[in-house]
Amino acid sequence: MQAPAVSAVQQHRQHCLIAVTSAFGARLTTPAVAPVLRLTSGLLHNSCWSLRRQARKLGVNQRSRQAHAISQIRTEAMASEHALISESAAWEALKKHVKTIEGTHLRELLQDQERCEELIKEYDGVVVDLSRQRVVHETIIKLLKLAEEAKLKEKIDKMFDGEHINVTENRAVLHAALRAPRDEVINCDGQNVVPSVWEVLDKINSFSDQIRSGSWLGATGKPLTDVVAIGIGGSFLGPLFVHTAFQTEPTCALAAKGRRLRFLANVDPIDVARALADLQQETTLVVIVSKTFTTAETMLNARTVRTWITSALGTEAVSKHMVAVSTNLKLVKEFGIDPANAFGFWDWVGGRYSVCSAVGVLPLALQYGFGNVKKFLEGAWSIDDHFRSAPLGRNLPVLLGLMSVWNVSFLGCPARAILPYCQALAKLAPHIQQVSMESNGKGVSIDGVPLPYGTGEVDFGEPGTNGQHSFYQLIHQGRVVPCDFIGIIKSQQSVYLKGEQVSNHDELMCNFFAQADALAFGKTREELLAEKVPEELIPHKMFSGNRQSLSILLPNLTPYTVGQLLALYENRVAVQGWIWGINSFDQWGVELGKSLAGKVRTQMNAARTKGKPLSGFNYSTTTLLTRYLQGKTQLLYPDPHDVFPTNILPGHEK
Ligand code: F6P
């Protein structure tokens, strides 16, 4: 926890207390009520809604005094950096504006060409169509006003200026620096970080070249053709997303010929079996990817694969067959990896924002060559540069973020579907799930104040058209789920059959266009009657329409545009967090489960090896754990021996 942030909050609470007491007058500062008042202004230091509630509790009937107090607090609060956005006039105005929007239907809104023109934006080949959002010109103005109230521009600047905006971890947030051109200057704590970024990139360039060219050989003198990247969460999902996107791109596919890249994330031994299936130790390079180098799953998998390597090649082989990516180079060394074979990054790179660091760049460069990965970084930087410099009204990540805030906080849609019409983007939704949900799923403001509104959205998705045959029923006729449709103009692969009306990719894209319109326009009773649909089926076949979506159209899916897409989402998530006034860059919510797993681990081992009874668990956990331990008596403890999955999946390719 960072000291300055806490004291700022304390200062502000003090400030609110003074404001509350002076507004309500001495009557409320009697010893009996003062502690309650202090609690109010302390816990909810600038929330007028809570102040009203508190005033009611205290039996304050003097309406005018109360109103005066509230307005004074609101003014004080909004003047403060720590105010909740829901107390702002812009938020109130948007809440009122919902009524206007409720009186519209996308069927009509989409007839307004001027409106549509205003809502279709383009930057560096990326087209973003917001015309199927439930917005009119006035909505955009009001959302931009909200951005202004939230000091969005200042927050973007603070990020690029290397300020420690991740206050609970006292860290800067500079993943954009990972893709900055060599000559860019991005300072953090008084130092330009770009040269150190490029130092690591140059090292990856040279190392990946040695591996790929065969000048670096394994312990038995064979070239290392296969890579297993061990890591979880941000040390896995981003690299997997990019790998999946590159795999079928012709230039990348050519560069990857004869090579295999596997990921091992889950601590489930089945994942070990999948990752190692068909691989030979002699030709395998293992990359351990962990920012902290303490993540339990990753470290157990790393020890497992180290044993798999050394059991066949001896301990000396580690220096040739295992490398690491981490910010914790001390632990990398203790694990037995030569620091020369470690690729560092920095605490100003959050795990889920780390794909552009060695976390993603190393495994991807090993598979596809550094040149292709460099283009990916360039694409991401193109959007970063736009994000930091474009006016908010033309800024793609800003507009995308504002649409999400509008849908979640005002139109009451807490979910979002990510629907790429491109099989190569199959892992986009799982990656964005972490980027978005780990970032914005928070219950308190950046100052620790409980929020009276929900943040984040529930993300899910599948590539079209697969999703259409799965969950689209719900989004067409069930719940309203704002959708992101992502389409590609020129497919990575071509299939066209003589005699077919359109190419296979055209067919895919016909669905991309159709689905967005189906959601927006729906189907009316009148249309069904005209089609002579029997009366009893009409309610079942009607589509209300008016279901919002947005479309992103990319010219192609190359390393460059994959980078653009990544940065669009990363920056959009940050925008949402800044508007909601939360810290999108910490993740304390993942800690409790981890520590409880540690407690289970200790007791499981003690029960097995010493016959110790379980203690301290609730009835349910004790019962299930006992049942589990009874069912696992085949394990040979306390004298275990190394067991590896057999090559159960010959020919299996991940
Ligand atoms: O799940 C929590 C988390 O800390 C993520 O934020 C992170 O991406 C993941 O674990 C992996 O962490 P590490 O890279 O330190 O192993």
Image (cartoon, grey):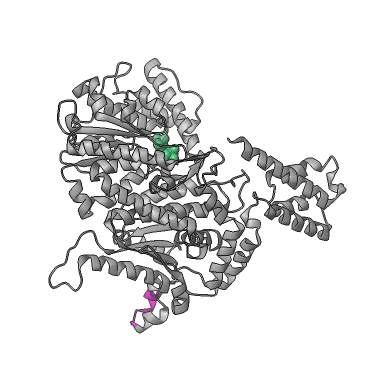
Q: Nearer the viewer, residue 313 or 29?
A: 313
**Which region is colored magenta?**
531-538
Please say if 524 is above or below 238.
below
Q: Which of 387 and 72 is in front in this view?
A: 387
With 415 as the anchor, is 473 left or right in this view?
left
Q: Position of residue 560 (x, y in %)?
A: 32, 55
Is 175 in the magenta? Answer: no
Please say if 116 is above or below 210.
below
Q: Quadrant of residue 31?
A: top right
Q: Position of residue 475 (x, y in %)?
A: 40, 63
What residue lies at 57% left-to-right and 73% top-to-bottom? 100
Tell me, yes or no, if residue 76 can be seen here: yes
Please say if 119 is above or below 3.
below
For ligand 1, which image quadrant applies?
A: top left
Q: Which of 160 and 23 is in front in this view?
A: 160
Tell me, yes or no, if residue 308 can be seen here: no
What residue lies at 51% left-to-right and 54% top-to-bottom? 576
Q: In which quarter of the image is the C terminus?
A: top left
With 251 as the anchor, is 7 left or right in this view?
right
Number of disc labels: 0
What residue lies at 64% left-to-right and 50% top-to-bottom? 81
